[in-house]
Amino acid sequence: MKKLVALVLAAVMSLVCVAALADPITLTYAEVNPLDGTIVGEMAKAFKAKVEELSGGEVLIDIQAGGVLGSEDQILDNLLGYGNITDISRISAFALTQYGCDKASLLSIPYTFVNEQHFWNFAASDLAQDFLNEPQELGIPLRGICYGEEGFRHFFFKNEVKGIEDLKGLKIRVSSDPIMTGMVTNLGASATTVAFTELYSALQSGVVDAAEQPTANYRSNAFQEVAPYLLLDGHTLGALQIVISDNAWNKLNADQQGWIMEAGKFASETCAKVVAQIESETFEKLKADGATIIPVEDKSAWVEACQPTIKANTEKLADLYQQILDMQ
């Protein structure tokens, strides 16, 4: 009888295990840019691969790229509203400023990072972890997993420009970010809010004259077809985060949460490795595409013009901002 009970129990446990394996947890990862040819795409693929490797298939990542789940603002609204469309997303570091994350705003201040190593010094610091935890401190149902970057952001134009003086009066697309809006206004242009998914057509039709993006995103979205003049002013570094909603986080047990965080470290390391290579390849491809690349040898006029926005958005957190500046 005992043997029979043991066999039955073993069979039941086997069925339970099979059922568990048959029903992994699937988390949807939203990315507004294409996966191929972009730094953020490589980061997403690295995150997915590492989660699924560490979990042995217990946790799966379903990447939805190319903006199919909406704009960054729409994705964030879904994450924060406990929606069931998105669980994880790659967002711009400044995207959380509209929800009261003041620390995050410091990463999008114009001309903060002197080079990419400066940013990675920050990303490896205790201060970076403090910034990632800011939503939790404010009671926002979201948590940062890791940081990454997608190169410096530059302006690109429909018509030829030569320098800062040519921005006056132009309609330049911005996201719904007050710092970006302030910077564009400081440069003498008209800040025009357009959803990223509508930017190509907005440039094509003349709704806007220009926009700004990291180089890889500029080419992967084919913006050079409608705005072939890329001016390398490098106003901000494309700092980004991978974030997960509390709704998704709370579905996971402690081991699964650990795998998510470990995969974040791997994705961040992957980003640091591929960013220079992809940027270099992108510049060569852009030249082949016929894009005109305009260097900015002296950025002092740009920095001076943007001082009103820089000062207005750092004075409340001046000590923290100075810590970031000192990390170069």
Image (cartoon, rainbow, N blue to C red):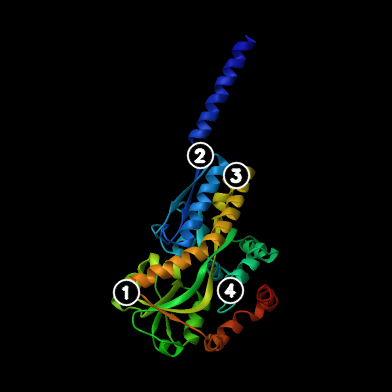
| Comparing labels 1 and 2, the label whose residue is closer to the camera | 1
- For residue 38, what is the image quadrant? bottom left
Q: Secondary structure at mark 4?
A: loop
Marked residue nearer the N-terminal end (4 or 3): 4
Marked residue nearer the N-terminal end (4 or 1): 4
Q: Secondary structure at mark 2?
A: loop
Q: Residue furthest top?
A: 1
Quadrant where the image shows the N terminus:
top right
Residue to which mark 2 is pinned: 24
Q: Position of residue 208 (x, y in %)?
A: 35, 79
Residue to which mark 4 is pinned: 115
Residue to which mark 1 is pinned: 226
The residues tagged by marks 3 and 1 sit, at their Cα atoms, a distance apart of: 44 Å
| Comparing labels 4 and 1, the label whose residue is closer to the camera | 4
Residue 144 in view in this figure: no
Residue to which mark 3 is pinned: 256
**Residue 284's disc number:** none
- For residue 300, what is the image quadrant? bottom right
Q: Position of residue 214 (x, y in %)?
A: 47, 70
The residues tagged by marks 2 and 3 sit, at their Cα atoms, a distance apart of: 11 Å
Instruction: Judge by depth and name the residue closer to the eye, 30 or 222.
Output: 222
